Amino acid sequence: MRYTLTNCTVLTVDEHDSFYPNGAVSVESSVIKAVGNAADITPCGEVVDMGGALIAPGLINTHTHSHSSIFRNTADDLRLMEWLETAMWPMEKRLSAERAYAATALSCLEYMKSGITTYADQFYYADIIAQAAKASGLRCLLGATVFSGSSPETGDTLKAAVDFVEKWRGREDQTLIYPALGPHAPYSVSAEIFREISAIARRYGLVIHTHISETAEENAGLQEKTGMSPAAWLESLGVFENKVLAAHCVHLSGADLDIFAANRVSVSYNPVSNLKLVSGIMNYRRMKARGIVVGMGTDGAQSNNSMDLLRDMRTGALLQKHIEQDAAFFTARESVRMMTIDGARALFMGEQIGSLEPGKCADIIALDSNSPRACPLHRGLLGSLYGALAYSLCGADVTDVMVGGRWLMRGRKPLLICESDIYKNAQQASEYLIARP
């Protein structure tokens, strides 16, 4: 796999904000060999004319549930706990391995078509979900979900999680599946199990991906039960001695944020899901002030309906501007970095992905500069390029996707997976779930 991408504008999102109005990127095997002005790049392998496209790092979705695409448009306009208890959990009980695969394949198709090249997932049927993700060619940090109770997959979710880790760890370079542990949340996982998860994560060097302080009710319930906030409780259990990716984090106190900063807990910001379920608005300013790494997440399609990260990022940035009453807050540059290099850091993968630099994985997307949403595009102005990605373009403008030096989509057509089969299988799986009481 040797390519040189030419006739393109390249936005690297590196630490120097390097960009090249008439740029080129050369790829050898799975990594970027060179990036810069076209005149300075010696072509290698197949020379690919990108038709004036805007080239950027692949987008990184830091929190989602890929099985949930088949629940889309079936349980809207409900409050969080009502939504979980009366709709989501009852439908999830009717999942099977086959239906989980169909749902994940649909989600991966949507990620790809929206420019997402890496995503952090959390659910049971992790082995099946990993197989679907692997078939798509996308990069996936996958946490096998653990509850105190049973799941549709098994009566022992912790054992299933350990089995998943032992099967998939050590093969990340070949599979692009990065096994993790996914304890659901402090309100659904006991202290004993959290301690076991923490010990397993330390043994294998795994990321723990969990939900923290999504709602005020969650905080109040744990405070009444333990006398502590979710963050303080997890710290007391030793969970934060590991690499932890925390989703939502809407209701964190100053003391909670200090715990996050001291333990280098990373955060996934999920503005659209939080707005739809009226969970609240994450306080980005206080996180930023403490140096906490924040990435952007869509959450699952059952609580968002769309998994277009560019769309969600725009909503999230504008929302933060509004609550701060400061139009200069949360800039276009910050938005793009949150979807790319900061997302990579949130997944503890900043050395591998998130920017277009020599030696990093060749995870690259191309966006159509002939889209009406891209015009006018001032290729020589960095602010115009960041602004286009942050405020103007959407997932539908993504034309080409490469992950690890392999083309997954060209001219908006997936190359490794069959769209028509995916739609058919997902439709059948969703109709089954809805038809059963």
Image (cartoon, helix red, strand yellow):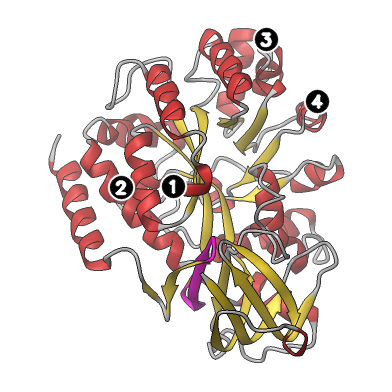
Q: Which residue is mark 4?
A: 255
Mark 3 or mark 1, whichever is nearer to me: 1
| Bounds of the magenta segment | 396-405
Q: Residue at x 67, y 15 (%)?
A: 233
Q: Cβ–Cβ below 8 Å for labels 4 and 3?
A: no
Callout 2 secondary element? helix
Marked residue nearer the N-terminal end (4 or 2): 2
Q: Main secondary structure of the magenta part?
A: strand
Q: Tell me whether the residue at label 2 lies in contact with that at label 1, contact meaning CB atoms closer than 8 angstroms.
A: yes
Q: CA distance from mark 3 to mark 2?
A: 36 Å
Label 2 neighbourhood size at 10 Å, few (<14), some (14-19), many (20+)? many
* In the foreground, 117 or 318: 117
Circle 4 Cα neighbour tier, 10 Å, few/some/many (<14 / 14–19 / ≥20): few
Q: Are marks 1 and 4 in contact (CB under 8 Å)?
A: no
- Amino acid type of the residue that numbered disc 2 sits on in the rendered structure: Phe
- In space, the residues marked 4 and 2 are separated at their CA atoms by 37 Å
Q: Quick check: marks 3 and 1 in contact, CB under 8 Å?
A: no
Which one is earlier in the sequence, the residue at label 3 or at label 1? 3
Q: Nearer the viewer, mark 3 or mark 2?
A: 2
Q: Give the amino acid at mark 1.
A: Gly
Give, as a three-letter code, the residue at label 4. Answer: Ala
Query: Is residue 122 placed above or below 73 in the rendered structure?
Result: above
Residue placed under numbered mark 1 in the picture = 300
Q: Which mark is drawn over residue 227? A: 3
